[in-house]
Image (cartoon, rainbow, N blue to C red):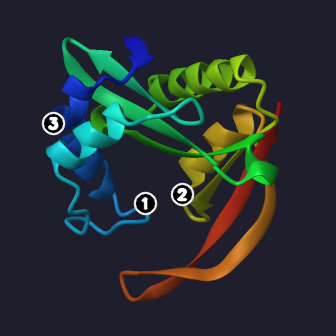
Amino acid sequence: MIIRKAVSTDAKQLAALMKHVEESNLMLFEPGERKTTSEQLQKRLLAMDEKSTVFVAEENNELTGYVFAIGEDVKRKQHSVYIVIGVQQYVRGRGTGTELLRAMEKWAIDKALRRIELTVIAHNKTAVVLYEKMGFDIEGVKRDSLYIRGEYVDELYMSKLL
């Protein structure tokens, strides 16, 4: 497995991977709801500034995971990034998420950031365990935050201070 920064030529594979990950029903977007095209994603990757980045996991020339770290323009929040992570189903449990988070954290430390934050669906126990293993703490619960398969579900606010 190779962990590296995403480049604009990854856009087509990355867009497909994001749509695949959403089929798990454990992400904000419902399966098929995301309308981001590879062209839009390519433009986003080309326009990345110093406050944001994307890392990808690659095996045999195929993208198997990603983590977006999204920085803030607001001066009072420039010490912080919000992250979104997704891993191809067939490689889950093999360390891909751990390695993506390590790469993103190293990047954040190099940028002298103080805080990494995320939200996760409360019943996604595998993800919660990963985040806790990587040093994230639960800060709060966003009750009935999402409506999934006819039920309201909670999201957890989690963060890690560097």
- Mark 1 or 3, which is nearer the eye? 3
N-terminal of the pair, mark 1 or mark 2, is: 1
**How far is disc 1 from disc 2 in space, using C-alphas?**
7 Å
What residue does disc 2 label? 124
Q: Split into 4 quadrants, where in the image is the C terminus?
A: top right
Quarter of the view holding residue 55: top left
Give amino acid for label 3: Lys
Tag 1: residue type? Leu
Residue at the outermost bottom position:
150
Q: Percent x, y for residue 142? A: 69, 75
* Residue, disc 3: 12
**For marks 2 and 3 on the same chain, the one whose residue lies earlier in the sequence:** 3
C-alpha distance separating marks 1 and 3: 22 Å
Q: Residue at x 19, y 65 (%)?
A: 32
- For image coordinates 37% across by 11% down, the residue present is 1
**Label 1–label 2 contact, CB within 8 A:** yes
